[in-house]
Amino acid sequence: MRLSNLAKGSSVFLGVIVAGFLSTAYVDQRFVAPAKTASAPAPTGTPDPTIGPASSACVGEDGSWKNWPWPNVPALSPKCR
């Protein structure tokens, strides 16, 4: 292996690491759940995920996900009680 090949490989590896870090920071800022303010009224019929003990995600009677604030949903979640 020549020194130029090592330099190219190292720069690509470093570029992938930096791109991964930057994309993670972007995703954390873009998809974080909005903070609840005291003046904003809570929506009716949906539990506030920040109040009370955290419960696991479940599927409601209408097929919608409950107790899961993120856009992706876990597979094989149980039905809500």
Image: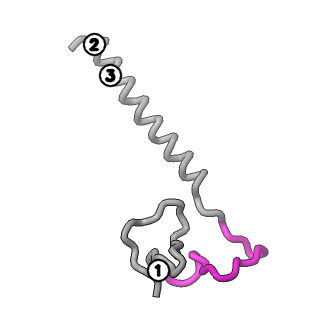
Vertical arrangement, residue 27 with respect to residue 74, above or below: above
Q: Say whether marks 2 and 3 touch (CB < 8 Å).
A: no
Q: Which residues are magenta?
A: 35-54
Ranked by sequence position, the earlier of labels 1 and 3 is 3
Question: What numbered label is drawn on residue 55?
Answer: 1
Determine the residue positioned at 47% across, 76% down. 59
- Residue occupied by mark 2: 3
Q: Nearer the viewer, residue 69 or 18?
A: 69
Q: Of helix, strand and loop, which one carries label 3?
A: helix
Q: Is residue 29 left or right of residue 7?
A: right
Circle 1 — which element? loop
For marks 2 and 3, the one nearer the N-term is 2
User: Pointer 2 and pointer 1: residues touching (CB < 8 Å)?
Assistant: no
Question: Residue 9: which numbered mark, if any?
Answer: 3
| Residues at marks 2 and 1, CA–CA distance in whole angstroms | 55 Å
Q: Position of residue 14 (x, y in %)?
A: 39, 30
Outermost residue toward the front in this view: 62
Question: Crowdedness of circle 3 by 10 Å Cα count: few (<14), some, many (20+)?
Answer: few
Q: Nearer the viewer, residue 57 or 10?
A: 57
Residue name at image x 51 percent, y 72 percent: 65
Q: Amino acid at mark 1?
A: Ser
Task: Determine the image quadrant of residue 78.
Answer: bottom left
Determine the residue located farthest toward the left in the rendered image: 1
| Distance in Å between CA atoms under marks 2 and 3 | 10 Å
x, y percent for residue 70: 53, 63
Height in image: 68 above or below 72? below
Instruction: Nearest to the eye among marks 1 and 3: give it.
Output: 1
Q: Is residue 10 left or right of residue 50?
A: left
Name the amino acid, label 2: Leu
